[in-house]
Amino acid sequence: MKIGTDGVLLGAWTTVDNNPESILDIGAGTGVIALMLAQRSNAEVIDALEIEPDAYEQCVENFELSPWGDRLYCYHAGLDEFVDEIEDQYELIVCNPPFYSENVASGNVQRDQARQNEFLPFDELIAAVSKLLSENGVFTTIIPFKEKDAFVKRAEGEGFFLNESLHVRGNPTAEIKRVLLTFSRVAKECDNTELIIETDRHVYTAEYVDLTKEFYLKM
């Protein structure tokens, strides 16, 4: 699986201001977000969860080859199985979930699992986070902008409050396609911001460069 802009954005934007000692990346793919958080934090435990076999194997290999291999571990399991078996809680949970709620199959099961919401419904994700997140923990995710209101409402139903929201445009005239969200169990005024990625094709804004430059070889 290619490294996508969404994963890079989430890995770079997710707050580590609470100095989490334990992190969980749900649906880790090949592990890029977990690796970014290992680079950005001093967390002693960084667990990842990936159900697709090929992605899981790549994730494990990437973890082992990284400078932070002693802090990274990937579980090969589905979220429901993981919730039933794991008693630990995490101070930071991050998820770049499947986006497409429409039932559109590409013919490639791996690609469909990575992209289609039917493999990880938002209500299942939020319920799992409610069980796995510590009382003072933080949960971050990136979803389609059109799903924002429904997602926030589901999260509120599980006792979460929206603390931060970042609306993302591909260019200055593009519609908002993605939104990054930060939730906790602490009610506070939501910090709403916007990010534009490019001013022209491959001409990145200063804000995007500043956010992601630590993770690209050429930026």
Image (cartoon, rainbow, N blue to C red):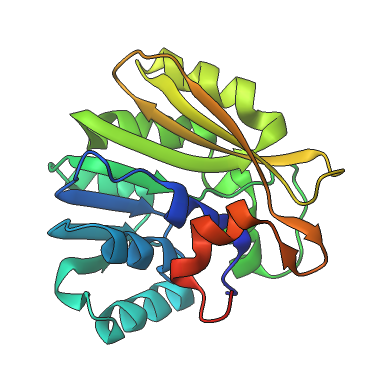
- Determine whether 96 is above or below 108 in the image: above
Residue 106 in the figure: left or right of residue 165: right
Compared to residue 108, the image places residue 208 above or below, namely above
Q: Is residue 75 visible?
A: no
Name the spot of residue 107 as percent of width and height, x first: 75, 68
Query: In this view, which residue lies farthest toward the front?
Result: 206
Q: Is residue 39 visible to the viewer in this orientation of the structure?
A: yes
Give the vertical position of 15 relative to 109 (above or below). above
Q: In which quarter of the image is the C terminus?
A: bottom right
In which quarter of the view is residue 110 placed? Answer: bottom right
At x 32%, y 59%, the residue is 37
| Residue 189 quadrant | top left
Image coords of residue 118 (percent x, y)? 60, 44
Out of 214 and 66, give the one closest to the viewer.
Answer: 214
Please tell me in which quadrant of the rendered image residue 133 appears. Answer: top left
The residue drawn where x is 24% and y is 37% is 132
Query: Measuring 37% from the left and 18% from the top, which residue is drawn there?
Result: 158
Extreme residue in the right direction: 173
- Image position of 88 (left or right of 207): left
Residue 52 horizontal/vertical position (percent): 47, 67
43 relative position to 4: left or right = left
Q: In this view, does 6 lie above or below 218?
A: above
Of residue 1 and residue 165, the one placed in the foreground of this image is 165
Report x, y in % for residue 54: 47, 78
Residue that appears at 51% across and 55% down: 211
Quadrant of the image for the N terminus? bottom right
